[in-house]
Image: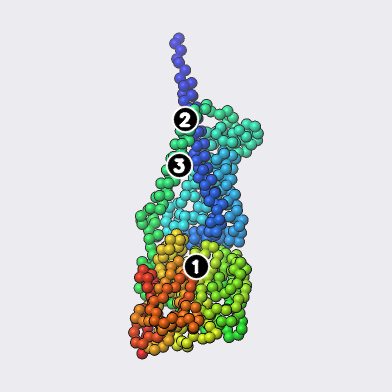
Amino acid sequence: METVPNQTEPKSNAETASTAWLIVAAAALRTAFGVFMAIDAWLKWQPGFAAHYVGYLQNAANAQPRWLEAWFHMWLRLVTMHAGFFITTTRLIETAIAIGLLLGLARRITYFAGALFSLLIWSTAEGFGGPYTSGATNVGPALVYALVFVAAALFEHLLGRNPYSLDYYLGRRFPKWASLVEWAPKRSAQPPPALGWDQQLGVIGGIIVILVFALATLGSARTSLPPTPQNAAAAVSPLSIVSGAPVAHPYSPVLPPLIGNGNAVSVSLESSDVTIEIASGVQYQAWTFNGTVPGPILHVREGQTVNITFVNHGTMQHSIDLHAAQVAPNVAYRSVNPGQKVEFSFVAQVPGAFIYHCGTPPVLQHIANGMYGAIIVDPIEPLPPADVSYVLVQSEWYTAQAEGTLMTGDYNKMLNGTPDEVVFNGVAFQYNDHPLTAKVGQRVRLYVIDAGPNLSTSFHIIGGIFAAVYPDGDANHALTGVSTYPISPGEGVVFDAIIPHPGKYPIVDHSMRDMMIGAAAELQVTP
């Protein structure tokens, strides 16, 4: 009887060789991903990560749908009360994951921790709308990271023990280690037939090239998408959706009376997160002093002692920095956690128009989100008596659409200095519908402060020349014959105007771009 040749042995060898290739490929994928995690872990240890950590969470929270607000506010309250702990824990976890991937160490724990860690990032710092992109529907790289960890775990489970890992060699010496960290501890401890080094290096190199290309393509696609329905929100500006109706509740520009006439006065300020109007019918999720942007106008007299109490009712650390004060900033201007307060006193020794603002890093973000106001210090040697006095604080809004007519902050725009609005007292064009008023021949005093946070202003009244400009609030330093005067971010200047003819006089930033996007008001002069 003729014997049939055995066909199973070649097939078994082919399957074993295929498995060897897959095991090398799985190890190469794990190691290549470990390189990216190591780079990311290194970035986490940089000072900028700690400085911006809570701000990233706040930005993400501002952009989420309302049904997720409770989740994000819970995380913000938890993180802001223990920011140092969370920053250090994040750094240590990501460093441990990177080491585990690079060395193939404790892989079961590494893959589980990596997937869970990535999902938590996805649902907090990036959110369900993509990383820091309000209104977008892309899932963001953190979810991709979670899927890579899950895929790696499945490969390990299907292929068995991997000789291209530290776990394999530890498991041969300490069997209990293998049962703890291997995904298939009951399989043979013998490695599959080894491939040649040239073949192994080829597989590893190919995997790295593919992974680099995939991540680079993902990053390019995320930054260059046209404004389609998925990411059209990024192209919506407040002035493109503004209502035709007048601003319902304009910020009062009138200089209030002195807080008190005694030798000492007390000022209470508190931070809070409030939705405010930044253009007619358009709202913004702002960080505020006392619920308004700008904060309340503080009016004191040179020589008075000002007792400040600042209470943080926000969801992250805040502080207060008064340019009219001369105090140690590490004491008076220190950041405080939600629910805490800081108290200090200073003597208002220098007259003029000054800004106060939040000084918590990143200061750019805190000012741009609305945390600024004006403090006016009257000189002991008075300026010429004014008939009417107004306070105008110029600032910028950098926005992204959260939903509908609700806007939130765009930190990239803040960094690039590309505002959507430049405004007086927080709202674009509000004093066109609610003009400042005066009579012919009256002395109109304008306390003008540039809160920035980025742009200077060239202050001008169209059709008028200033009767006097006081760069520092000292009557002896008055300038005359000035029609336009520059003010830098953080600076304040006092202007007097006496208008000889009735009419409507535009008040503008003479930067035409800034005037067109909100820095315009009207002074209505009657007989």
- Decide: few, some or many residues near mark 1? Use Cα within 10 Å; few <14, some 14-19, many ≥20: many
The label shown at residue 30 is none
* Residue positioned 54% across, 67% down in the render: 359
Taking 91 as reference, is 172 above or below it? above
Which residue corresponds to the image point at 49% horizontal and 78% vertical from the top-left?
472
Q: Where does label 2 land, which residue?
A: 199
**In the depicted view, which residue is nearer to us: 132 or 348?**
348
Inspect the image, locate mark 2, and give the three-letter code of the amino acid beneath it. Answer: Gln
Q: Amino acid at mark 1?
A: Ile
Q: Residue furthest top?
A: 1
Q: CA distance from mark 1 to mark 2?
A: 57 Å
Label total for image? 3
Question: In this view of the protein, can residue 71 be seen by the observer?
Answer: no
Along the viewing direction, whichever of 482 and 169 lies nearer the viewer: 482
According to the picture, the residue beneath numbered tag 3 turns out to be 211
Question: Does any portion of residue 3 appear in the rendered image?
Answer: yes
Q: Quadrant of the C terminus?
A: bottom left
Residue 367 circle label: 1
Amino acid type, mark 3: Leu
Check the image and report above or below for 522 versus 53.
below
